[in-house]
Amino acid sequence: MTRRGLRFGLLGTPVLYGGEPTYGAPTSGEAPHGEPAHGEAAPPHIPRTRNGTPLLPVTTPKLRTLLAALLLDAGRVVSVEALKDALWGGEPPVSALPSLHNHVARLRRLLDEPGRLLSVPTGYVLRVDDGELDVQVFDAHVSAARAARAEGDWARVRRECRAALGLWRGSPLGGLAPEVGGYALVRRLEEARLLLHEWRYDAELALGDDGLADLVPELSALADEHPLREAYHRQLMLALHRTGRQAEALVVHRDLRARLADELGVEPGKPVREAHVEVLRGSGTRDGTSRWVRPAQLPPAPAHFVGRADIREGITRALSGSGSGSGTGAAGAVVLSGTAGVGKSALALQVAHALEERFSGGQLHLNLRATEPGSAPLTVEEALASLLRDLGVPSGDVPGHPDAASALLRSLLAPTRTLLVLDDAASAAQVRPLLPAGPGCGVVVTSRSPLTALDGAARFPLRPLSDEESAALLRAASGRDDITARHPLVALTGRLPLALRVVAARLAARRALTPDALATQLASADNRLDLLDYDDLGVRRSLDAAFDALTASDRRTDQDAALVLRHLGALDLPCCDARSLARRTGVDEARAEAALERLADVALLEETAYGRFEPYDLVRDYARERAAEPCAHATAGCHFASA
């Protein structure tokens, strides 16, 4: 018999390729079932492989077992004892040896090729040349597909995968008893088959032919059969999405994420997250359209903005590399810090609006509520969920774990040029998970604290305006052109933009009220903070939030800082250092210094020189007001609680 290509098959029930069925005579000790006797005609229909190669089934279990045992050690001697164990397990009959000889003779007649199955003193050798065993051909296609995948040749990947999978007729060594062995081979081949399916569907998705819709039933079956194999779910998501079935794709992701969380306590891996991003953004659809909505969330820019020219230029320079997409691989971030009412949010909005064209991906704005009266700061989970929803992620698809939600946010923003304005941040820990990683994005953070633990950020501490800038703001916002830099209102407002806007609002509301009259009221008032409160603008409210956060904190340093502010108000000290504070309060100097540094960190004090702290002008009034109130630590005489 002339050999052509494949000759032996183990990828399913053991078979022979390329010959006509030939049936041997029954042997003693075995009665074949349903097998034609020797000399009978073969069945008229010969089964063939997908490429037309004749397929010769090996019809009796013993012959299949013998063939498989010899093929598992093709080209090597298989001992008589090993063959007896394979055929009869641990209990061979008395007639095992002659029966084995009969089976070998029948297999030789079936092979119909002299010199193919050789006898040696200790056993038998089945000669198998290269390319004759389907397992060898399968492995060759797997190697070729792997190489093509590494080169990005998706057409060849698909071709090789289809050729390899076309050899598969069922579970390798199907229908054989465990005694035959080959367990490790079967496991390897089964895993290779699953990998080939992954590669083939990746190739189909990469090539994007019109047959993507036909992949959905196949991938659905594989995803059901392998519920924890993320690759099939990822490919099913993409196939659904790219054929216009986005909602179904999102359901696949939701179910997979829930299953992984429930059974393994993990989130989907990066490839699934990237596919989820594609679905959410609407990219990769067959019609080329995208469902990405460009965010434009910035509140209006301040109507009257003056000063800060040097700082605005510095912020623009810090963000210029990120917006141009030519940065070093990380988003540009700036932190604007300073006391309550110093104009951090106004400056952030002024700069953000000026950079709208540079950040073509849009602008996100989120109030982190660190000092919002009557409200707790946003948690990281709340902030991430808010940003993801703003980017179009349905609430049900927002990952529950902060790390996964942060990764999804970075993935969504990575290919964009988006500016994030994170207003009123409490800490670096609150901000860090919200930062994008792509070089095209920029971030502006406002906070009472300089957030020095936020690595890589450019910091711009803000001080009150100059006299000239303060007068310019008063004139612009009030419509009173006669206010100069020497007017008492400038000093009485502490040159804080928030206080200046309150004064301007009062002047604009009452045309009969002159700047001089209002200055007299402020100077003679028992507490000018009462007059620096108008409508929804108020200096006291901004300071309350910072002070209340200190008193409500469980940290001793925060509680100490709140008490120190009362001391400064009661004693009306223009400045203070740790040594004098320790002497006045009876605590150690290190503890006093920690409390002063904490007040400086939340911008209630300013460190004008090393170790020397001064309250801002309006903070001094606020401290006096707090000192006059009943103290929550009355038992300690409003001094530090005992160490």
Image: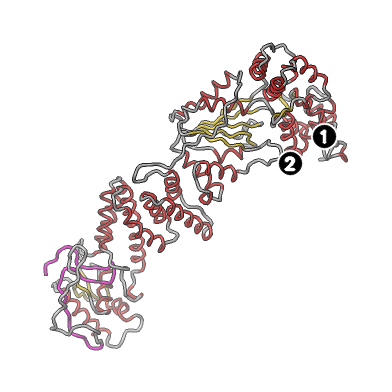
Q: Disc 2 or 1, which lies upstream in sequence? A: 2
**Nearer to the camera, 358 or 575:** 358
Q: Nearer the viewer, mark 2 or mark 1?
A: 2
- Element type at mark 1: loop
Q: Is residue 498 visible?
A: yes
- How far across and down, in percent of the image, does residue 222 sit? 38, 61
Which residue lies under the disc numbered 2?
553
Q: Residues within 10 Å of mark 2 (few under 14, many from 20)?
A: few
- How far across and down, in percent of the image, does residue 615 sit? 75, 25
- Element type at mark 2: loop
Say which quadrant the N terminus sits in. bottom left
Q: Which mark is residue 587?
A: 1
Q: Is residue 73 visible?
A: no
Q: Which residues are magenta?
A: 1-29
- How far across and down, in percent of the image, does residue 259 sit? 50, 59
Say which quadrant the C terminus sits in. top right
**For the residue marked with disc 2, what is the amino acid?**
Ser
Q: Is residue 632 left or right of residue 167?
A: right
The reply to whether the magenta stretch includes residue 11 is: yes
Magenta: main secondary structure? loop
**Nearer to the camera, 76 or 406:** 406
Can you say whether 544 is above or below 486 in the image? below
* Residue closest to the far left: 2
The reply to whether the magenta stretch includes residue 118 is: no
